[in-house]
Image (cartoon, rainbow, N blue to C red):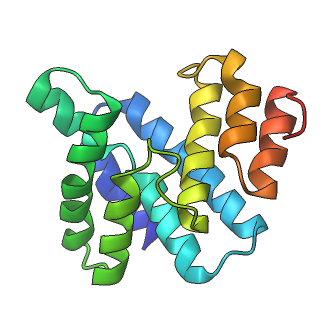
Amino acid sequence: MTGKIIQEMIRFFGTDVKRIAHALKVYAYARTIAELEKVSPEMRESAVTAAILHDVGIKIAEDKYGSCTFRQQEEEGPLAAVSIMSKLSLPAPLIERVSSLIGHHHTPEAFQDSDFRILLEADFLVNFEEGNLNLSLLEETGKNHFRTTTGKNLLTIMFGSKPV
């Protein structure tokens, strides 16, 4: 089913290759963290599905407002994600959970559940890698927002930061 979700995300973004690539990178890190942390299949499924669809709110907000703040992205993302997931006939509990994760993915204190932490850490890793976040925030972000051992290790390996 992951392949179908990715395909629908690509259809959604169309020619916006930058956003497609971002989503695929977040998905890859989320899947890696979930696997190495040995989270339950349900947590893994919600984390990776949310990772694939986490930024769909950007397109809606940009069309609607001409720009996109984190809050607008969190407000617009869940409905777009529900539309995509419903088209694929995903189970209602998964749709509900993923839409909730997407609706809070820029609010680090929103949840402590492993699927949310995985999504958050994967998105931070990619945002640092892509230059969307200043590397001067690396140590503070790692200390304040990374909870998984795998996420912390990836942050340290990739960016040579002090272990968090």
Label tally: 0
Residue 155 located left or right of residue 130: right
At horizontal 60% and vertical 57% (from top left) the residue drawn is: 117
Quick one: 149 or 30, which is closer to the camera? 149
The answer to whether one can see residue 13 in this image is: no
At horizontal 61% and vertical 66% (from top left) the residue drawn is: 114
User: Does residue 114 lie above or below 27 as drawn?
Assistant: below
At horizontal 46% and vertical 67% (from top left) the residue drawn is: 2
* Among the 4 quarters of the image, the one containing residue 91: bottom left
Residue 95 in the image: x percent, y percent?
Answer: 31, 72
Q: Quadrant of the C terminus?
A: top right
Q: Quadrant of the N terminus?
A: bottom left
Quick one: 37 or 52, which is closer to the camera? 37
At horizontal 73% and vertical 38% (from top left) the residue drawn is: 142
Residue 156 located left or right of residue 91: right
Residue 64 located left or right of residue 122: left
User: Does residue 83 lie above or below 21 as drawn?
Assistant: below
Residue 98 in the image: x percent, y percent?
Answer: 38, 65
The answer to whether one can see residue 164 in this image is: yes
Residue extending furthest toward the left: 64
* Among the 4 quarters of the image, the one containing residue 52: bottom left
* Among the 4 quarters of the image, the one containing residue 126: top right
